[in-house]
């Protein structure tokens, strides 16, 4: 039973007159009362909800894949389960022991397969939700708390500038020094890239497109939820009336992409990266003819999107150096290695780095 649930049971028994102190008319022991009060504290989440949580949180669960990704960078040892299974590739970076955790499903999204009974059996002290808040989220989290007797908090995470605040809040909620360290890292990384890009006149920034899908003809449009890295560092040529916030982006078509004629293209994962140079239909695009097209690294998570979360911090540092290599004097291998050590606790081997960066760097 969780600490909060135990306190609720104790309060219920007291109200019914079932405790020895109530029956005898004695006052509750002052030391015991102080201990009970110290067992919990109240935090205010990003929705403005005041949530009573254990004073020390040692067992946590994620509401869905974005929260899971974030919590795996902070306190994987405190997670009592997963919202979704991890692939063998991901486990190689995140820790093979995570494969033994139960899978709860996710509260939101297309699946909506959150297994409340499995969560309750795993006995987390806290459920953490991370992402963009929808209008009904406060009511839904309140209802979930009431159903399973486990406190739930939401932390906003909407763009590159929100990740430092996200980790600051996790540092407070979890009492985590690592979260505080990651907050500082995110703050410094974004500030560094913004300072470099600010020195480049807008007209001199590369005209770029971030393409995905089996045919490479979907795109992350300017101003969309998942295009922040492309928008910040370059001129995103993909401009549509209604930018999609989904991982699939907007359906564009090759004819329109050819009209925009980006001079730099990033493809999601492998997509059509391996074959696009031999496709006659793509041959006249400036980025293809010049060889100025690349593949976004994607293990354990895509560096740019899907999900658009703290994985974007390394994506931002990589993409900025791809656009402006002459403006950075460090070694990308060192930058990537530091990120993987800090966020995943993984020391990249030379072989892993080379595989990860295949197609992602200029030759």
Image (cartoon, grey):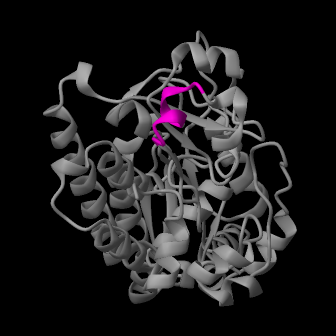
Q: Which residue: 82% across, 42% down?
A: 110
Q: Which residue: 47% across, 45% down?
A: 157
Q: Is residue 84 visible?
A: yes
Q: Is residue 43 above or below residue 330?
A: above
Q: Is residue 18 above or below residue 227?
A: below
- Read off the magenta span: 284-292
Q: Where in the figure is residue 6, as x and y percent of width and height?
A: 65, 77
Choose between 234 and 44: the one closer to the eye: 234
Residue 286 lies within the magenta run: yes
Choose between 179 and 191: the one closer to the eye: 191
Q: Is residue 25 visible?
A: no
Residue 161 lies within the magenta run: no
Q: Where in the figure is residue 352, as x and y percent of width and height?
A: 52, 80
Residue 213 located left or right of residue 222: right
Choose between 234 and 130: the one closer to the eye: 234
Residue 147 located left or right of residue 225: right
């Amino acid at each position: 039973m969780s600490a909060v649930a135990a306190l609720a049971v104790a309060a219920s028994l007291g109200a019914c007159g079932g405790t020895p102190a109530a029956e005898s008319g004695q006052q509750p022991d002052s030391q015991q009362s102080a201990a009970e009060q110290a067992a919990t504290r109240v935090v205010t989440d990003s929705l403005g909800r005041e949530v009573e949580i254990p004073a020390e949180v040692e067992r946590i669960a994620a509401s869905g894949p974005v929260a899971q990704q974030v919590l795996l960078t902070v306190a994987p040892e405190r997670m009592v389960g997963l919202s979704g299974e991890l692939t063998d590739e991901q486990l190689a970076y995140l820790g093979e022991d995570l494969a033994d955790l139960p899978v709860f499903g996710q509260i939101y999204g297309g699946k909506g397969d959150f297994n409340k009974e499995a969560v309750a059996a795993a006995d987390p002290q806290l459920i953490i939700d991370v992402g963009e808040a929808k209008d009904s989220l406060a009511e839904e989290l309140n209802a979930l708390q009431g159903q399973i007797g486990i406190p739930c908090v939401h932390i906003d995470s909407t763009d590159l500038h929100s990740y430092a605040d996200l980790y600051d809040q996790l540092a407070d909620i979890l009492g985590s020094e690592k979260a505080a360290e990651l907050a500082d890292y995110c703050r410094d990384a974004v500030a560094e890239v913004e300072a470099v890009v600010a020195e480049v006149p807008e007209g001199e920034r590369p005209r770029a497109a971030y393409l995905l899908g089996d045919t490479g003809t979907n795109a992350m449009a300017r101003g969309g939820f998942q295009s922040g890295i492309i928008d910040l560092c370059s001129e995103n040529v993909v401009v549509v009336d209604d930018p999609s916030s989904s991982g699939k982006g907007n359906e564009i078509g090759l004819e329109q992409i050819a009209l925009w004629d980006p001079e730099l293209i990033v493809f999601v994962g492998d997509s059509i990266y391996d074959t696009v140079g031999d496709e006659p239909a793509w041959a006249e695009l400036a980025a293809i003819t010049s060889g100025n097209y690349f593949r976004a690294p994607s293990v354990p998570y895509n560096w740019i999107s899907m999900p658009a979360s703290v994985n974007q911090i390394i994506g931002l540092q990589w993409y900025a150096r791809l656009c402006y290599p002459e403006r950075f004097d460090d070694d990308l291998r060192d930058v990537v290695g530091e990120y993987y050590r800090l966020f995943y606790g993984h020391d990249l081997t030379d072989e892993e780095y080379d595989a990860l960066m295949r197609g992602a760097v200029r030759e």
